[in-house]
Image: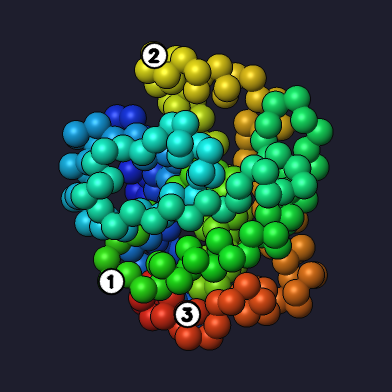
Amino acid sequence: MMMDRHVSFESCFNFRDLGGYLTTDGRTVRWGCVFRSGSLRLTPADFAVLQRLRVRTVIDLRSTRELESEGRSGYLGELDYHHVPLFEQEALPFRPFEVGRPDPPQGEMYLSIAVACGDSVARCLRTIAECDHAVVFHCAAGRDRTGIVAAILLASLGVPDETIVTDYALSDRALEPWLTWAKVNDTKVAADIEALPNSLLTASPQSLIFLLEGVRSSYGSIEKYLVGIGVGADVVGALRSRLLE
């Protein structure tokens, strides 16, 4: 099942299906409804894969600065595109994942982002709940910002923490092919990846455990966190109706 969820593209990495996960009440997340990914650089062949997956909505979690600097695939103009920056670099008291800056530990960073940027998390969840077709949300690498949203989404569906952490850790297998591609096609991206410390190159399970436990400690439960960021029972109900079987 873990192998099946990874979708191969020519120039897009860490694209995978969030389907197939069991919830605590015995239901299953539907396959082919919601995907997570790294940056959607798309060749014509890649866009054909996206079409076969019936993806019609894209949620881009990258910052405005990243979008202006790196742009987006021209093919996305044919889809329902939502730019929902999980955070803007200048809006946080720290600059996440920036080389040479003393960032807080990764788990603390995740929790800080989930708390400070709840409006963006809520926009993502509402967008997914409103769609009647396949959706993909992504950031640059598809691990950190995408991982935060994926964790909150799966938790809202009732997927156990250990499963959510396992899904998060699957991002590690995308690093090597992404770096290999970048060395040939985008040397700046390759240099940025290679400049990162080892602590930021791997998906530490403890970081996501810290996020989930921290949200519950701060708010009392995932459900109360969702209410606090403006995601009511109606949205959670719509997500579960659409994504669970």
Q: Viewer-proximal residue, 65 or 224?
A: 65
Q: Residue at x 36, y 73 (%)?
A: 130
Q: CA distance from mark 3 to mark 2?
A: 43 Å
In the figure, 191 relative to 24: above or below?
A: above
Residue occupied by mark 2: 184
What residue lies at 33% left-to-right and 54% top-to-bottom? 81
Rendering coords of residue 93 (x, y %): 77, 47
**Label 3, label 1: how far apart the Cα atoms are:** 14 Å
The C terminus sits in image quarter: bottom left
User: Mark 1 = which residue?
Assistant: 132
Q: Element under label 2?
A: helix
Crowding near the residue tagged with mark 3, few <14, some 14–19, many ≥20 C-alpha atoms within 10 Å: many
Residue 192's spot in the image, x, y percent? 57, 22
Q: Which residue is mark 3?
A: 235
- Earlier sequence position, callout 3 versus callout 2: 2
Q: Quadrant of residue 39?
A: top left
Secondary structure beneath label 1: loop
Residue 1 drawn at (x, y percent):
39, 53
Q: Is residue 32 left or right of residue 98?
A: left
Say the numbered circle drawn on residue 142.
Answer: none
Q: Earlier in the sequence, mark 1 or mark 2?
A: 1
